[in-house]
Amino acid sequence: MTSPGDFSISPFDGDSASWDRCAAAAVYGTFCHLAGWRRIMADVLGHECVYLVALDRDGTWAGLLPLVRVRSRLFGHYLVSLPFLSYGGPIGEAGAQERLAAEALAIAARSDADLLELRTRHAITGDLRPSLRKIAVVLELPDSAAALWTSFPSKLRSQIRRPLKEEMDVRFGREQLHAFYDVYARTMHGLGTPALPGRFFEDVAATFGAYVDLGAVYLEGLPVAAGFGFHWRDEFELTWAGSLRALRPRAPNMLLYWAFMERMIGRGTRRFNFGRSTPGGGAHRFKEQWGGVNLTLPWLQWSPRRIDQTPSPERPVYRMARAAWRRLPLSVANRLGPRLARQLP
């Protein structure tokens, strides 16, 4: 059994292939741990990246941790692994994970960060406190779409049939990127939340093409719901999804999720991850109706100022700002939003 003292920490030297091999081999590795995110965080969003490797006594890679510094005069100084995503905390051997978490704490303390947040999907022992403010819903997929369909309650099936009766259709592929961003930006505006820049999603799709899947629901030739997600091992996570607010009574989002599940079963994927949400919130209730199980995300935190979360439009302090943002013309929100969104990890 190894201990944290058996490992040393080294800055990532840029060997992306070695990094990705380590991420793929680690039990708790995710698509968020791939090296390509470092360039996107730095070049597209303008954040400093502090990527760390844990080495055993023989100099062999035993673990890794991607860290990103998100700093702004408006919102504060945050060290997050990984911002804008649900995962990215320390992975590798148990002792290496503890050593990496301790090193992240030391870096956060030296740089006077307001909050360190390691977005783990599994528990890690050490000095950092767990935050239980986010949850994921994961659905085990059967061998056939027919089996999944019959497992749904009749109300859920009728909600899926409604957009089909209205002749909505679903299209998949990288060519749906523009449709996705159009729906995403409109959805975020309706929520009173700044949208990430379009270039972010363009670079993510280009960098992680083999892992990415995009889909959009169309009504009369126009996209009305869309999603962007990632394949990793035998799981698919629908990381970003939205639908036009005015059409929600016609349930295009229900068709979107069903179509993605049907597509994943056809690919042999075993689990459908609905992505993270706040426990008890509207998004969480929407995801629970599909029959999945809750997966509490034990993110690890440290703050010298007793801050327990990164800036989020969900917080009551931002309620007035959200209302004002919704009143902005969409064109103005789309122009200003990306500048603000990159500061909300």
Image (spheres, grey):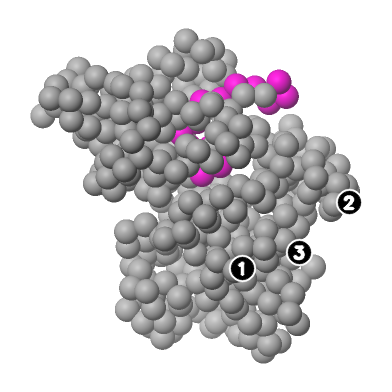
Determine the image quadrant of residue 282.
bottom right
Q: Going by the image, does 120 lie left or right of 160?
A: left
Q: Circle 1 sits in a helix, a strand or a loop, which is it?
A: helix
Does the segment drawn in magenta span residue 2?
Answer: no
The amino acid sitting under disc 2 is: Pro
Q: Badge 1: few (under 14), some or many (20 or more) residues near its Cα, within 10 Å?
A: some
| Magenta-colored stretch includes residue 81 | yes
Magenta segment, which residues?
Answer: 73-85
Tell which residue pokes out farthest to the top in this image. 110
Which numbered tag is attached to residue 245?
3
Residue at (60% x, 39% y) in the render: 44
Q: What residue sits right under mark 2 in the picture?
A: 329
Q: Which callout, 1 or 2, points at the residue further toward the start of the chain?
A: 1
Position above or below: 31 against 173: above
Q: Which residue is mark 1?
A: 176
Q: Residues within 10 Å of mark 3 (few under 14, many from 20)?
A: some
